[in-house]
Image (cartoon, grey):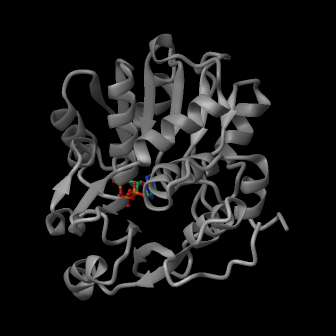
């Protein structure tokens, strides 16, 4: 580790959001910058929605290497970039911008690959061909998960959402492997599943719990939750109690940050237990 001081040649990146104060990304990237003794900085950038176009334009003028993009800008930023990677287009959102030496802005979405990397880390026995997946929710997080599972070859993928029309829209957008199933059928739909993913906000601190009877879920199905506050959601606790392998959501946050850090700062960082503890605020 270094003392974090910067030279005049320091590389600069950050996160654009509104509000941005709650973001854990500065803490996460700050940890890696110190660990790898990078001459660089990662700063929170509070950008009000009306200022998004001028803020994004200003990034290359200021010499930024790139930024993460978070709520509420992930969709709106799509139209402000010089290039957008195909997976980000399919997800319909950008969470990472990489600025080339020529000042061109490229949009990426690393949420899907972060999801898969976390799943592979936390449940090494899971295979895309293991059987059907059940995905709860139909928001932006669900889209990233769906694209990742589709690209990995998982089929079928049952999508269930309180507002059924949104699940139907996802099935229409992504095609036959994705099947919209009514929210009310969620307990039965678990029969035969190899993977259960919660992408809704249910179970998050301050939100209602996810009401789901797990009785039909096979005992070896992997259960994962994108919620990571608390780390062990009621869903994960219930799944663990009946012996299912479980994967918490913190790893997705950590893994989605890897490609951005590598592109901006030139080092591929590792996701370690110490990093997990640090980002959750329990490490030194
Ligand atoms: P994100 O981009 O994080 O996925 P989002 O687009 O706001 O956020 O999606 C939140 C998801 O949580 C949605 O699937 C939402 O269901 P609706 O589409 O019906 O709104 C789901 N969700 C939030 N509160 C819920 C609740 N009380 N019961 C069931 N689902 C809920």
- Point out residue 71 in the picture as x, y percentages from the top left corner: 38, 70
- Is residue 108 visible from the viewing direction of this image? yes
Query: Vertical placement of 240 versus 97: above or below?
Result: above
Look at 45% across and 12% down and name the residue there.
Answer: 129
Look at 53% across and 25% down and name the residue there.
Answer: 195
Q: Quadrant of residue 105?
A: bottom left
- Point out residue 197 in the picture as x, y percentages from the top left corner: 51, 36
Q: Quadrant of residue 28?
A: bottom right
Determine whether, in the image, residue 237 is placed left or right of residue 32: right
- Point out residue 264 in the picture as x, y percentages from the top left corner: 44, 61
Determine whether, in the image, residue 275 is placed left or right of residue 26: right
Q: Residue furthest right?
A: 284
Look at 68% across and 65% down and name the residue there.
Answer: 37
Query: Quadrant of the image for the N terminus?
Result: bottom right
Look at 22% across and 66% down and name the residue there.
Answer: 102
Residue placed most toward the observer, 123 or 193: 123
Query: Vertical placement of 173 versus 53: above or below?
Result: above
Disc tally is 0
Residue placed most toward the observer, 267 or 194: 267
Query: Quadrant of the image for the C terminus?
Result: bottom right
- Point out residue 205 in the picture as x, y percentages from the top left corner: 64, 64
Determine whether, in the image, residue 184 is placed left or right of residue 36: left
Residue placed most toward the observer, 121 or 208: 121
Query: Vertical placement of 78 versus 129: above or below?
Result: below
- Is residue 213 visible from the viewing direction of this image? no
Query: Vertical placement of 13 versus 115: above or below?
Result: below
Q: Quadrant of ligand 1?
A: bottom left
């Amino acid at each position: 580790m270094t003392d974090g001081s910067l030279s005049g040649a320091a590389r600069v990146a950050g996160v654009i959001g509104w509000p941005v104060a709650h973001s854990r990304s500065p803490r996460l990237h700050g940890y890696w910058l110190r660990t790898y003794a990078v001459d660089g900085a990662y700063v929170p950038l509070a950008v009000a929605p009306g200022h998004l176009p001028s803020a994004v334009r200003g990034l290359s003028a200021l010499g930024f290497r790139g930024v993460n993009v978070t709520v509420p800008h992930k969709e709106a930023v799509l139209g402000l970039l010089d290039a957008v990677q195909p997976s980000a287009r399919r997800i319909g959102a950008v969470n990472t911008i990489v600025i080339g030496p020529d000042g061109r802005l490229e949009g990426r979405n690393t949420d899907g690959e972060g999801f898969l990397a976390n799943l592979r880390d936390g449940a090494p026995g899971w295979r895309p061909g293991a059987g059907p997946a059940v995905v709860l929710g139909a928001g932006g997080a669900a889209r990233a998960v769906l694209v990742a599972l589709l690209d990995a070859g998982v089929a079928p993928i049952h999508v269930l959402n309180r507002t059924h029309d949104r699940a139907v829209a996802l099935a229409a957008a992504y095609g036959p492997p994705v099947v919209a199933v009514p929210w009310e059928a969620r307990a039965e739909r678990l029969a035969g599943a190899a993977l259960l993913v919660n992408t809704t906000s249910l179970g998050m601190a301050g939100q209602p719990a996810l009401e789901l009877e797990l009785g039909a879920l096979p005992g070896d199905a992997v259960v994962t939750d994108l919620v990571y506050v608390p780390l062990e959601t009621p869903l994960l606790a219930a799944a663990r109690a009946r012996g299912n392998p479980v994967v918490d959501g913190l790893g997705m946050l950590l893994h989605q940050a890897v490609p951005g850090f590598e592109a901006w700062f030139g080092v591929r960082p590792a996701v370690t237990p110490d990093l997990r503890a640090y980002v959750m605020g329990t490490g030194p």
